[in-house]
Image: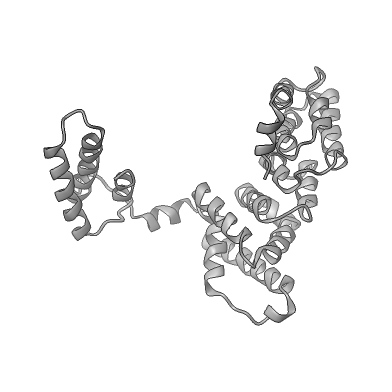
Amino acid sequence: MLGCVRKSQYGHFSADDRQRLLSITAELTHDLPPGARTRRLAEQVRSALLTDARGTKCINRADELFEQQRLADTTTADVIIRRVLLGIQNAADADRQDFHDDLLLVLLDELLFGPLFDIRLCLAMLLAASPYRRSVSHALADELRRPSTMADVNIAVSLVNALSVIGDDAHAGVLHNLIVRRDVPEKVPSAAALYVGHMTAGRSSDIWRGAVSFHLHRWHAQRDQRSADVLADLVYALGVSGDDAQLDVLSQREAPIAARTAASWWRNMSSTVRSSARV
C-alpha cells in the first residue's frame, strides 16, 4: 500500500492492476472507520489510481522519467561503460578472462548513471558482495584517474560514490588524491572527503595528515571556503575511520567553525557508538 501511490504516478500498474487495486481500496474505504490510518492511505492510493485512469494528469512512465534524469547521455554512458568493462576484463583472474555476463553491463549502467541515489547505492553494495568486486574497483579507480572524467561533475561524483562502497583501502589513494586537487569541480573533493573513511577504517593518522594539513593551510592563508567545506566533509571520514588524532586537530579553534563543531561532536561521542559507525 505504501508504495502504490508512487508506483501509480510512475505508471507501473497495468489496467488490470488498477482495477484490482480500485476494488481493494474501495472495500478498505468502506469498511474501516474514518480516522483509521489504513483508510486514509487507501483513499490516497485510490485518488492516485483514479487520477491516472482519467488522464487528468500527464504522468511519465518510470523508464521515460529515468531516461530524462540520467546522469549522462546515452553516447557518453556507453563510452564509459565499455571502458570500465574492458578494465574489469583486464583485472579479472586468468581463469575468468573469457567469462561474459550480459547483466553486468546493465548493472554498471545503473550504478554510474541512474538518476536515483538509493538505487546506485544498492547496486554498489551488490557488486561489493560479488566476485567482481576487485576487478570493478580497479576499473573504477582507473576511470577516476582519467582527466576527461572530471569534465562532468555528476559522473565524477557518481564514480567516487561507487568506488567508496565497492573499493577498499587499496584504492583509497585515488580518493585521497582527489581531496587535495584544485583542478577538479568543487563537489568532487567534497564527495571524496565525505566517503573515503569507509575505505580506510582503522588506518593510522598518516594517511589523513596530508589532506587535513593541506586544507587547513589554505584556510588559514586565504580563508578559502572550498577548503573549509572539504574539511567539514572530511570530519565524517575521520570519525568513521576512528582517527582521533586528526579529529583533535580539527576540534581546535584554528579550524573552520563547521569542521570544528563536527569534530567536537565526534570526539564527545562514546567509543561504543563511534565504533558502530565504522564499516
Above or below: residue 187 compared with residue 261 = below
Residue situated in front as seen by the camera: 227 or 172: 172
Q: Position of residue 200 (x, y in %)?
A: 76, 46
| Residue located 13% across and 44% down the image | 27
Q: Quadrant of residue 231?
A: top right
Tell me the quarter of the image containing the N terminus. Answer: top left
Viewed as shown, does residue 189 lie left or right of 52? right
| Residue located 79% across and 26% down the image | 250
Above or below: residue 220 compared with residue 186 = above
| Residue located 60% across and 61% down the image | 127
Q: In the displayed orientation, state which residue is furthest to the top.
A: 253
Q: Position of residue 229 (x, y in %)?
A: 70, 30
Q: Position of residue 259 (x, y in %)?
A: 73, 26
Tell me the quarter of the image containing the C terminus. Answer: top right
Viewed as shown, does residue 27 lie left or right of 102? left
Q: Position of residue 96 (x, y in %)?
A: 68, 78
